Structures are given as C-alpha cells and as structure tokens.
Amino acid sequence: LAVGDVFVDEPVPYIWIRANKVRGLKAQDRNRKLALIGAALDAAKDALQARGKAKLDDKLFETFGASGRGADSISQKLNHVLRRAGIADKRLTIYSYRHAWHDAMRAIKLDEWTQFYLCGGSGFLDRGIS
C-alpha cells in the first residue's frame, strides 16, 4: 500500500488497492476501493501521520514487504494476532474472515450497499453505490 492509495478526507474515506510502484496486482479486476470506518479509519490516519512528508509513491508501512513478500508478511502477522486472541483453528485465517463475513451478510439478506460499505470489494465506489 502506498501513501497515495489512502484517502481519509473523502466523503467516504477509503484505501485504493491498485498496481503502483510498491506492488502489482495478479489481475486487473483486483483493483478496488475499500471503505475505511471506525478503527480502520483511525489507523489509516495514524499511519499517514507517522509517514510525515513521505512521497505519494512511498510505502505506507515501511517494514512490510521488505523481503519482497509483502502480502505474505502481512497475512502471517495478522494470523499470528488471531492465534494470540485464542483462535486456534488453523483453517481460520485473516483471508477467510472477509469471505465468511460476506456469506453471513448474504444469509441475512443484508442489502448490497451495506455489504459493499462494510467490506469494500470491487464496485463499491466505482458502481455509484452511494
């Protein structure tokens, strides 16, 4: 994630997952905007403030991806947080939670706008859902 991929002052604050100088994407349809709310918005603001006068192309989090495997590094650290929180089942990973959350929202027939607002995903800001 680059500094320039974080938009905290927009009407709906978001991060933009896209190919940039920091990283590429496996497929173009992975390009998406994810809404920031609550603690995630606060953390994004803190991260931007911590980077000070960094350029827009600079990494937002300097320590992630230093080995060239940024996504794996972040997932590994977040999965460690899950284990420390008492979630011992190795089948439950940080990646699986987003999908499980979407499944739960669909099961209770939560409207599409709220699903996109809470989880992001391709289409939230680009579809004109507002």
Image: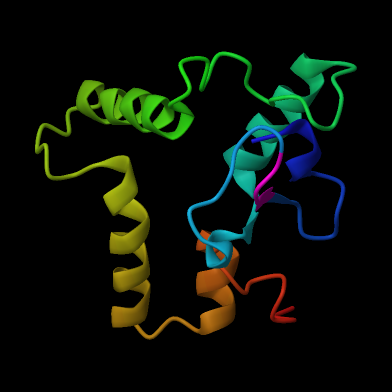
Q: Is residue 12 or residue 79 the one in the foreground? A: 79
Toward the right, the furthest residue is 53
Q: What residue is rendered at 46% in x and 16% in y? A: 67
Tell me if 86 is positioned left or right of 13 in this view.
Answer: left
Q: Which residues are magenta?
A: 16-20
Q: In the figure, 116 relative to 67: above or below?
A: below
Front-most of residues 74 and 47 = 74
Given residues 47 and 3, the one toward you in this image is 3
Q: Quadrant of residue 10?
A: bottom right
Residue 128 in picture, x, y percent from top left: 75, 81
> Looking at the magenta stretch, what is its main secondary structure?
loop
Residue at left offset 30%, top offset 72%: 103
35 over 86 or under it: above or below? below
Identify the residue shown where x is 25% and y is 26%.
85
Whether residue 124 appears in magenta in the rendering, the answer is: no
Whether residue 43 sits left or right of residue 78 in the image: it is right
Quadrant of the frame with the N terminus: top right
Q: Position of residue 8 (x, y in %)?
A: 80, 44
Residue 16 visible in the shown view: yes
Q: Is residue 78 left or right of residue 50?
A: left
Residue 104 in the image: state x and y as whole percent. Answer: 30, 70
Residue 120 seen in render: no
